[in-house]
Amino acid sequence: MKVCKFGGTSVATADQIKKVADIVLSDPARKIVVVSAPGKRSDDDTKVTDLLIRLAEAALDGKDTTAQLGEVVERYRQIAEGLNLSNEIVQVIENDLKERLEGDKNDTTLFTDTLKAAGEDNNAKMIAEYFSSIGMEAQYISPKDAGLLVNQRPARVQALPEGDAQLAKLRDLPGIIVFPGFFGFTEDGTLRTFNRGGSDITGSLLAAATDAELYENFTDVDSVFAANPRVVDNPAAISKMTYREMRELAYAGFSVFHDEALIPAFRRSIPVCIKNTNNPSAPGTLIVKERDHSSQQVIGIAADDGFTTLFVDKFLMNLEIGFGRRLLQILEEEEIPFEHTPSGIDNLSVIIRSRFLTPEKEQRIMERIKDELKADDVHFNHDYSMIVLVGEGMRDTTGLAARAAAAIARTGASIQMINQGSSEVSLVFGVMNEDETVILKELYKEFFSNIKVCS
Ligand code: ASP
């Protein structure tokens, strides 16, 4: 039994949904179909999820929402028409949206999440109806009925393992199950959405809970590539990689698969395959526990911008017991997660995603570190990028770091920070934003020239 998830572009139009039906029909093992909300039909289009967010914002601002509601309904109407479904389903969707808009606006998180979830929820209903209309045995199942349980923390919604036993029963239902991605319910029945792109998480959770033989994640590219195709021309396709490698790449900007989605599949050792709805016969990228990395030590290079460094210096810091803990506690109290903490004997840098900071927070943090930790120097540096070299072979190949550093030196850019993760699956270089592209290209040349496919 396989779980397949179809992303936004795979379910954005009637024609795309027809391809989904063909894919599901072509393999009887494809039993659970997780769907996103309709995504972009072209580069300048807007995802239904974004339309819904705007709709929720307008409603919370007390504005007239007729136009925004109409825009969402119109997207479903066009799809329903292209699938030859009756107008009844469009009416059901419109009524559902109106009901959500009537919800309690005092809890703004719940109100917004409820509207956001409508994108996948209604799409799943419509796709189930389409499958049935062409003679497939299919049914929509709601995450509430299936028991997809999530925690109470709206800031970081995560699935609870307590839901697994109930979810496992999906296996025993007859026919094909069409399941909306992106949201679950707390134990007291409150709807919560995962963070953006979270339908990948739903698919992985269901694959793990039902002990699927494979989790197929259908998107709009033939495979995961060794570097961003928008920066590097024709990058090598990755045919096989490990969970840890995908995790590192997804973390550092490979948006093809949500980084949190790997965890459930990884824990149950369910292989994940990234495939293309528009070219389903392409083999895709298989993500597994282990691979033979003797011939391809480095599997990919990711680059991500939007980082800030908090630099703290204090003479004899290395002898001060508890300094690091107290520093990180200040960040914890400001609700700021950190990414890396490279350190020297008298100084420590904390690398943070800039989106978690504001000028006021930075000011407060600097004052607290000076007052409470008596630091000699504290400041923030902005506009950093992280370039991450990823590969299982990093562990037992000598000279990889030297080759990478030499490649960066050839660009004339300077390295601000180096961090070799303890797992030794990745090597991270902190560089200035403006040097990111040229470094990525040079590193790619160093490690991938003449390679078409890597595994
Ligand atoms: N529709 C949601 C988003 O746009 C979730 C998803 O597509 O995975 O983020």
Image: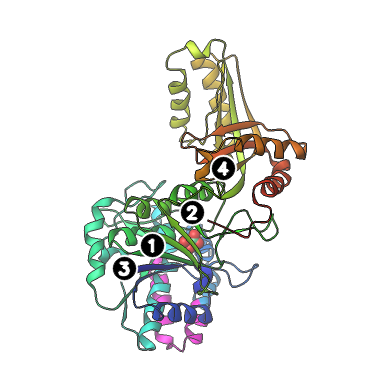
Name above or below for residue 52 compared with residue 343.
below
Label 2 crowd bin: few (<14), some (14–19), many (20+), radius 10 Å: many
Residue 84 in magenta stretch: yes
Label 4 with label 1: CB-CB less than 8 Å: no
Q: Nearer the viewer, residue 301 or 434?
A: 301
The mark tally for this picture is 4
| Among the 4 quarters of the image, the one containing residue 229 | bottom right
Q: Earlier in the sequence, mark 2 or mark 1?
A: 1
Q: Residues within 10 Å of mark 4 (few under 14, many from 20)?
A: few
Q: Secondary structure at mark 2?
A: strand
In what element is the residue under mark 3?
loop
Where disc 4 sits, the SS reads helix
Label 3 – label 2 distance at C-alpha? 33 Å
In primary-sequence order, the first of circles 3 and 1 is 3
Could you tell me how far apart the alpha carbons at marks 4 and 3 are, in whole angstroms?
33 Å
The residue positioned 50% from the left and 68% from the top of the image is: 283
Residue at 39% across / 73% down in the picture?
124
Marks 2 and 1 sit apart, C-alpha to C-alpha, by 19 Å
Please give the range of residues in magenta.
76-103
First along the sequence among labels 3 and 2 = 3
CA separation in Å, label 3 and label 1: 14 Å
Residue 23 locus on image (x, y percent) = 44, 78
Three-letter code for the amino acid on which mark 3 is drawn: Ser
Residue linked to disc 1? 203
Asked whether the viewer can see residue 56, the reply is: no
Q: Which label lies toward us, 4 or 2? A: 2
Pointer 4 residue: 355
What residue would you read off at disc 3? Answer: 142
Residue type, numbered disc 2? Met
- Between discs 4 and 2, the one toward the N terminus: 2
In which quadrant of the rendered image does the N terminus lie?
bottom left
- Foreground mark, 2 or 1? 2
